[in-house]
Image (spheres, rainbow, N blue to C red):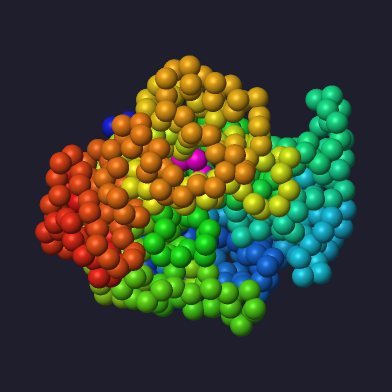
Amino acid sequence: MVSQVKFVDGLPTLCVNGEAVTEMAYITYNTKNNRYADFAKAGVKLYSVNLNFSEAPIGERAPVLVFQKGIFENDEPDFSIVDENFDEILSVCPDALIFPRVNTNLSLRWEREHPDELCEHGMNGRTRFSLASDVWAQEVKEKLIALIDYIENSRYAENVIGYQIAGENTEEWLPFEDYGFYGKRAKEKFLKYCAEKNIEKNEENYFRFASEMTAQRILEFATVAKEKLEDKKIIGAFYGYTVGCPHRAQCHLALNKLLQSDRIDFLCSPLTYVHGREPGLDPYPMVPIDSLKLHGKLYFSENDIRTHHSRPPSAHPHYSVKIWFGPNRDVSLEQIKLNFCRAFTHGHGMWWFDMWGGWYDDAEFMQTFAKMQKICKKGMDRKSSEVALFTDENCYFSLKGHKNKIWSVCNELGLSGVIYDIFLASDFEKVCDRYRACIFVEPTKTQLLSDCIRKAYEKGKAVMVVTDEDEVTYRTFKDFFADNGIAVPTNEKAVVYKSEKHIVFYAHKKGGYDFASDGRESFVDLFTGEEISFPRKINKTTCWLFEK
């Protein structure tokens, strides 16, 4: 078995033994309520499964969830847990391709035994391990090697295409205590960091250090895994939430470090949680996906779509908030379509995260997943964009709080009807000539952004700079595009994706809609076969996928 990410038709593509693979997967935390058989029947071949080093809770906001036994919870590893998880998938899909999500968090017992290796603060009255701890990191590496060695010498080694290395809060390499204060070991490392770089010991530099340290740990673990696998399988991780939560204390602001490394093949993130996943909005990713593509990295969106079946997994107050509940059945189906369409037309992979199990337990949902598989068989599509959005990781180190302009920019851009690409500003020189318009999100000034803005003007691009004081709406962007000769396909508020071969139209609100693309006003929906003509009155939440 050899898996790798290769460029196919200009897109980073998952290839197994030289053949491109459909990048649509399924995963659930709650394997006792899994839908492996349903997704296998729908034609899904790609799966992930959670393998935990310990039985520590997944997240600290609600430390009550433990769905899996810990492989290294006790003195001797229990690899039967691995066998059970793989066998459950392979019993219904013998030719499944699996990339396990390996939760590297060590046991609570280990933490009690190593008080000097913990964070400075913690939620719910307890502190967890520090990412800065070399003692912790060394033990993680040893256990990671042991787990990979077991799997690669097992009967299902040829079903395993790679590993997602996960850790910290909610497995996403987010700090346990939400502040990025990693305790005694971090303070020691920060002093050395400042001395080596001859920089001031202040908060801004501390958070820069914390992001770089997080990215470095991910690279260390990825390197250990790659060496054990002799570079024959893909390795990835959650990281780079520059768009979704660019708060300095989340420590996700060193993405460029991972993009420059050949040790990381794919990165992933959930789709935005802004506005509580309210239907009607563009479900944009938390990472600048076009920078990932530029650097040859595969991106998987975690489509953890809440549906009418979504229910809290426990009575903990954390699970009583709106985000854990989905809309009604009809809207849920259209949201599933929209999330698929975004990934498909933007040319990247996805997995359906059936978090507590049974979220997609609906015959029509599964028929729709089967149609998605058939659509993907022709290959992922590519965006057809004249607009690029740029953001700089360095903008956020001096900012306190969670008020980040990029959220409102992406929300409103997503309702403008015009598709856009999104990059780190460090990639500006490589890509700017492709675009007619450049939008810069500038919550604080950096030298890099200032240089990019100046060069965009010099190149004759249409330029919009959005600062922290600017208020923008979808109308702001429609007017900007119209003024600069960029086609706006509808006058209404709607999500529209336009790729090389397809068009997506999504409307949430009832009302009259106009829409035209390349002079056409009549289309056929690939999901239903229905002919759709504009202008028209739309009576319910609707997502259509058209071929050009």
Foreground pick, 82 / 271: 271
Q: At 86% from the left edge and 27% from the top edge, which residue is drawn?
A: 195
Whole-percent x, y for residue 214 in the image: 68, 43
Foreground pick, 521 / 166: 521
Is 494 inside the magenta-drawn segment? no
Q: At 28% from the left edge and 60% from the top edge, which residue is drawn?
A: 543
Whole-percent x, y for residue 185 in the image: 84, 45
Q: At 50% from the left edge and 55% from the top edge, which residue is drawn?
A: 272
Q: At 79% from the left edge and 62% from the top edge, which residue is drawn?
A: 122
Q: Is residue 383 left or right of residue 236?
A: left
Whole-percent x, y for residue 393 in the image: 62, 36
Q: In this rendering, does residue 5 appear at all?
A: no
Q: Quadrant of residue 466?
A: top right
Whole-percent x, y for residue 219 in the image: 62, 38
Foreground pick, 134 / 387: 387
Is 161 located above or below residue 435 in the figure?
below
Magenta segment's dominant SS is: loop
Which residue, as the protein is rendered here, is positioned at the far top? 458
> Magenta region: which residues?
285-289
Q: Is residue 206 left or right of residue 235?
A: right
Q: In this rendering, does residue 355 appear at all?
A: yes
Which residue, as the protein is rendered here, is positioned at the far bottom? 315
Q: Is residue 152 left or right of residue 189?
A: left
Is 462 located above or below residue 287 in the figure?
above
